[in-house]
Amino acid sequence: MATHEQQHLAEREVSLDIQGMTCASCVNRVERKLGKIEGVQATVNLPLNSASVRVPAGVTNDQLVASVEAAGYQAKVAVPAGHGGHEDHMAHGGTAAELRPRLMTAAILTVPVLLVSMVPAFAFPNWGWVAAALSLPVVLWSAWPFHRAAAVNARHLASTMDTLVSIGVSAAYLFSLAQLIADPGLTADPGMGEAHLYFEVAAVVTTFLLLGRYLEARAKTSAADALTSLLSLGAKDAVVLRDGREVLIPASELVPGDVFVVRPGEKVATDGTVVEGESAIDAALITGESLPVEVHPGDPVTGATVNTSGRLLVRATRVGSETTLAQMGALVSAAQSGKAPIARLADRISAVFVPVVLAIAVVTFLLWLVFTGDLQSAFTAAVAVLVIACPCALGLATPVGLLTGTGRGAQLGILIKGPQVLEDTRTVDTILLDKTGTVTSGKLSVARTVLLPGAGSEDEDGLLRLAGSLENAGEHPIARAIAAAAGQGPGLAPVSGFLSSPGGGVRGVVEGRSIVAGRPGWLEENGIPLDSAAADTLRREQETGATAVVVALDGTPAGIISLQDTIKDGSRQAVARLRELGLRPVLLTGDNAVVAAAVAREVGITPEDVLADVRPEGKVDAVRRFQEQGATVAMAGDGVNDAAALAQADLGIAMGSGTDAAMAAADLTVMGSSLGQVATAIELSRRTLRTIKVNLFWAFFYNTVGIPVAAFGLLNPMIAGAAMAASSVLVVANSLRLRRFGT
C-alpha cells in the first residue's frame, strides 16, 4: 500500500529544518546535494537554518531528508510558519542558549592564558604547562562545534569555514604542545626571553569566534521578532453563538459560517463579515494605518484587528491558513526563505573559497619557510590566513538583511513577495497609478441628476430610481453608488435581461422600459448618440470634476447622473515622495479626461502624464507601451480589472484594501489603503537592497584585504580571530538598523 507521500500527484513545496550549517559553503553544499535529485529545486537560508524545496511528483520527504543527511547535516520536515517552528532556528552553529556555556567557559579560561603568555609581569616558572592545561578545555570543549562540523564535512570530502577554524585552533595548540614537550624547560625561567608558544592564540581565537556566533544568534533572533510577533497577533479564543448561547472556544476551532461575538477592546478572531452592530476597527497591526475604520453590517473585518467601541456579531468567512494574517505570515516567510539575485555571486565564491584558502595557507607557510627559514613566523602567518579567511559574514550578508527588511515591512503593513522585488524597485523609473481606490477613495456618491429632453415624464427622482434599479444588479463602485442613492432595497424594481460591459456600462429592462447607462462613448457605440444640447450639458458636468453617467430610456438619452469621488488624504504628498524617489507618476483611469485632469491637478501629476478613458484591457496596453519606450514600470492598483496590468508591470503593487486577485498578481502588497504606503514600500525595498549590498561589501572586504595582510605576516592570529568575528557581527548589526526604518 502506497504511503501518503507517494500519493502526491503534483509538484509541491516542502520546507526543511536543517541543523549543522555554519557558512555560505554549507548552504552551497546542501543546495547542490538536493539539486542532484531529478526535478528538485532548493533554496537554502543560512540564518533560518531552513530550505525551501520544490519537489516533483514521486519524490518523497524521506528522500529529501536522506539527501541532506548524506551531505553531513541533520534535517527534518519543518513545522509550517505560524505553528511555532520559526523562531527555534535563528542561529547557525547553535542558539544563544546553547552557545552561552561554551563562551563563558572559554572566556574564563582564556583571560589567565592571555595574561601569562603576553604580559611578562604575570609569568612564573613553567607557566607554559599551566597555559596548556587551561587552554585544553577551550580547544576541546568550547571549540567542539567547530571540530564536529569540520569532521562531518571531512567525511564527505568537503570543507567549510569550520574546517579553517578547526585546523587553525588545533594547529596552534598542537604546535605549542609539541614545542613544550620537545623542550620541557622552555618556560622554566620567566626571564629567559620570549617562548614561541601559541596557546593564547588557540584560546583567544576560539573565544572571539564563539562571541561572534553568540552575538549573531541573539541579533538574528531579534531580526526575526517582527515575523514572530506578526504570527502571534491572532486572537487565541472566540466567543461563538450556539443555539442562542455564547460559548468560548479556541479560535483555531472556528469554521466558516460560525457567528462570533467581538466585544469592545477584543481582537477579531478571524476574517469575517459584520452581521450585527456598529463599531470602529483598529487595523494598525495589519495595515500599518493608525486611524480606526468605521464598520457596519455587511462590512468585512480582518482577523487580529481590534474592536475599539461597539459590540459586533461577525460571521466567519476565512479561517486557519486562509486568513489574511496567515497569508501575510506565509508571504513574509516565503520572502525570507528566498534568495536575491545579488546573493548568487556569494554562492559561486563560497563554493571554491575554503579549498582556495587552505591552499593559500599552505603556500604561505612554505614561502615563509623557504625565504626566511623562520618556522615560527611561517606558522604564525599560515594560522592568521586560516582564521581571517572564514567566510561566515558572506553567508549572512544577504539573508539577514532580507530577514530584517521583510520583517519590518510586515510591521508597517507592507508585504514583499520575494527577494527579486528588491532588485526591481531599484530600477523602476515610472509608476502608473490607478485613480479609483488608489489615488482617490473609490467611494463614489451621487452629487446630482440632470434631466435631458428625452426624459419624457420622468423627474430626477424617477430617473434615478430606474437607473438605480438597473445598476443594483451590477458590482462596479459606480453601480453601487447609484443604487445606494436610489434607495437600494425594496423601493427598487426588478431588472431583466441584464448585461454588463466592463469599462463601458450596463443595459437591461426595468418596468418594461429598455434602459442603458454608462460612458457617453459606449452609448454612442451602441447606437445612442448625444445631440449638441446633451453634449453641452455633459461637458459642463465633467468640468466640475464629476464622473458623468449617461442614462438612456428606450434608446434616447434622458439624463446624466453625476458622481463625485474624493482624493485620499496624503495622495498629494505621496506623489511628491514618488518623484523624490526618481519615479515618474502617471495617472491611469477609465474616467473621462476632464475628471482625470481635475484629479491629476489636485495631486500634482502633470497633464501629459494623464491617461483617461482607459478600459481594463487598455491598462495592460498602457503598461506595455511604456515598457516599449524603455521605461521600467511599476503599477499600483486595487481592483480585479487591475490584476492583468499588475502582472504585466515590472513591479506590481497591490493596495490591500482591494481584491485578492490584485494581491495575487502583485510583487508588493500594501495592506493599507494609503498611497503614501506605496512610497514607503519602495523606500523600504530600496533600503533593504542597499543594506544587503553594504553587507556584501564588508564581507568581501574583510576577506580580500585580510588574507594578503595575514599572508605577509602583518596580522597576529588573535587579531585575525577578532576581525573575523567582528565582520559577522557587523553584518548582522548593519541589518538590524532596518528595524528602525520609518520611525
Image: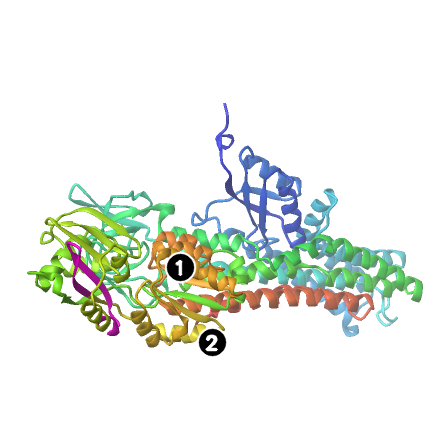
> Which quarter of the picture shows residue 265?
bottom left
Tell me the kind of residue under disc 1. Answer: Lys
In percent of the image, x 77 and y 53: which residue is there? 355
Query: Is 576 positioned to the left or the right of 257 in the image?
Result: right
Q: Which residues fall within the magenta stretch?
A: 541-561
Residue 642 screen position, x and y as percent: 38, 57
Above or below, comparing residue 263 to residue 564 in the picture: above
Residue 438 screen position, x and y as percent: 35, 65
Which comes before the other along the chain, label 2 or label 1? 2
Tell me the kind of residue under disc 2. Answer: Glu
Q: Secondary structure at mark 1?
A: helix
Q: Which class describes the residues within 10 Å of circle 2: few (<14), some (14-19), or many (20+)?
A: few
Q: Which residue is mark 2?
A: 580
Query: Is 711 positioned to the left or the right of 253 in the image?
Result: right
> Which quarter of the picture shows residue 462?
bottom left
Instruction: Residue 105: tell me if it is visible.
Output: no
In percent of the image, x 66 and y 42: which residue is there? 71
Query: Is 213 positioned to the left or the right of 714 in the image?
Result: left
Answer whether labels 2 and 1 touch (C-beta < 8 Å).
no
Q: Which residue is mark 1?
A: 619
Figure colour scheme: rainbow
Query: Is 203 positioned to the left or the right of 575 in the image?
Result: right
Instruction: Residue 178: tell me if it is visible.
Output: yes
